[in-house]
Image (cartoon, helix red, strand yellow):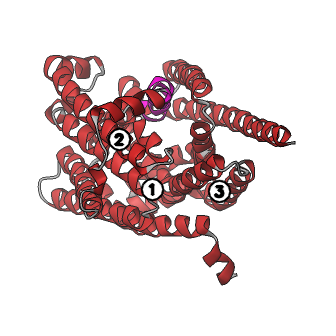
Amino acid sequence: MISRFKKNDFLKSVVILMSGTAIAQIITILISPFLSRLYQPEFFGIFAIYTSIISILTVIVTGRYELAIVLPKSESEARNVFALSNLIVVFFSILSSIIIYFFGERILILMNSPEFIPWLWWLPFSVFIAGIFQNLNYLLVRKSEYGVVSKSQISRTLGVSSVQLVSGLGNNTPGGLIGGQLFGQFLATLFMGYKLNSEKGELFKGISIREIKKMGKKYSDFPKYSASQGLFFSIGQNLPPVLLLFFYDSQVVGLFALSMRLLNLPINLIGNNFKQVFFQKASHSYNEGKDVYKLLKKTTIILSMIATIPLLTIILWGPNIFSVFLGESWYGSGQFAQIMTLWMFSVFISRPTMAAIQIFSMQRFLLVYEIIGTVVKIIFFIITANYFNAFYAILSYSLANVLFYLILMVYVFIKVKKKEDLEVLKIY
């Protein structure tokens, strides 16, 4: 079995990525009981609004060209895509600063979030660093430098955790949580940039304005469709804290945010690492005319098996686990976790499906799907929130997500199978 594992490049790559993510998530788990006792739920609520805004903006800050870095056959083309994506990050960061200067406070007042105003100018810096981080991450994945990616995850978590903990022990404000997030991201970006810079100038070899324009046109489907799709997807995932603040209060947002943070741990630990490695391996197989459907099916089944036991555990004992682990004041967070587990389960097992959509150029379908899905989910939430408490509002939103993820996966599986069957028929 060990010899079989050594020969399996896919599993080895996943394990390398998971090792770094596992250490990072263990640090997050260990520090969570301290942070939950140092910071009030209201502070986590403000932090959740901040991370929601960053998560939404990060999707479009690169024009989604970072996804295309993995696809070109030649290294020269990949470097030009990388350069293009970084230029878009710079432009978007400047644009966000201008928007904040003229309209930032007004937007926050309309969102019923005036308490976030002191942290408004942290956003452009966070968006810039997050964009560069994404570009470096995908360039390293292309080069199969999974060890560097793994170490960067550890450095980011150490930076986040240390600043948040020290700030909480001192003058605990939402700034401690926000500042820790920004510092950790900066530390990881610096680490990856340093490792890539050791290529002695190879990183910028062959880059020109002409080639950048050429790559921009070649992969124009990414900003046209993938960026729009990603934006709607991110809105669907990150809008709940904003909606909860509008209909309820920052304490409810904080309870929801911490449950979301902990439920996302397995997605970050396993799901996203599987997705990155699947993306690289499946892209390679697709370029060489090999079978991608079997890899997609196998990866999805593995993720489903991994997630089943944690899913049942949270459904049965979520509130008790949260109250013991985080403190009695977080019992409500465990109740939210119970009704969100099926949603997170569907997110978790759909990671390979999302990668397959990029590989098989189904961005147009995904854009329509995300627009319809996001609108329907928001309507579900608003209607429920107008008549019921936060528990039922989150429940309706979670069930709507489960339904749409199921539709997405069935559709993509059928399409991938049909496309590969057609390719086989062409050969004969």
Q: Which quarter of the rendering shows the C terminus?
A: top right
Tell me the element at label 3. Answer: helix
- Residue 10 x/y as whole percent: 60, 64
- Give the Cα distance between marks 2 and 1: 16 Å
Instruction: Estimate how packed mark 1 is, as few (under 14), some (14 to 19) or many (20 or more) residues with alpha carbons within 10 Å.
Output: many
Q: Is residue 146 left or right of residue 345?
A: left
User: In what element is the residue under mark 1?
Assistant: helix
State which mark lies toward you, 3 or 2.
2
How far separated are the C-alphas under marks 1 and 3? 20 Å
Q: Which mark is residue 141?
A: 1
The first of marks 3 and 2 along the sequence is: 2
Asked whether residue 117 is drawn in magenta, I would say no
- Which is closer to the viewer, label 2 or label 1? 2
Please tell me how crowded label 2 is: few (under 14), some (14-19), or many (20+) other residues with Cα within 10 Å: many
The quarter in which the N terminus is drawn is bottom right
Q: Which residue is mark 2?
A: 80
223 part of magenta stretch: yes
Of badges 1 and 3, nearer the viewer stands 1
> Which is more N-terminal, label 1 or label 2?
2
The residue singled out by tag 3 in the image is: 303
Left or right side of 345 for 98: left
Residue drawn at (53%, 66%) of the image? 13
The mark tally for this picture is 3
Q: Amino acid at mark 1?
A: Val
- Name which residue type carries label 2: Asn
Whether residues under marks 2 and 1 lie with C-beta atoms below 8 angstroms apart, the answer is no
Residue stretch in magenta: 221-239
Measure the C-alpha gap from mark 3 to mark 2. 34 Å
Residue under the image location 20 percent in, 21 percent down: 99
Please name the amino acid that badge 3 sits on. Answer: Leu
Q: Is residue 335 above or below residue 59?
A: below
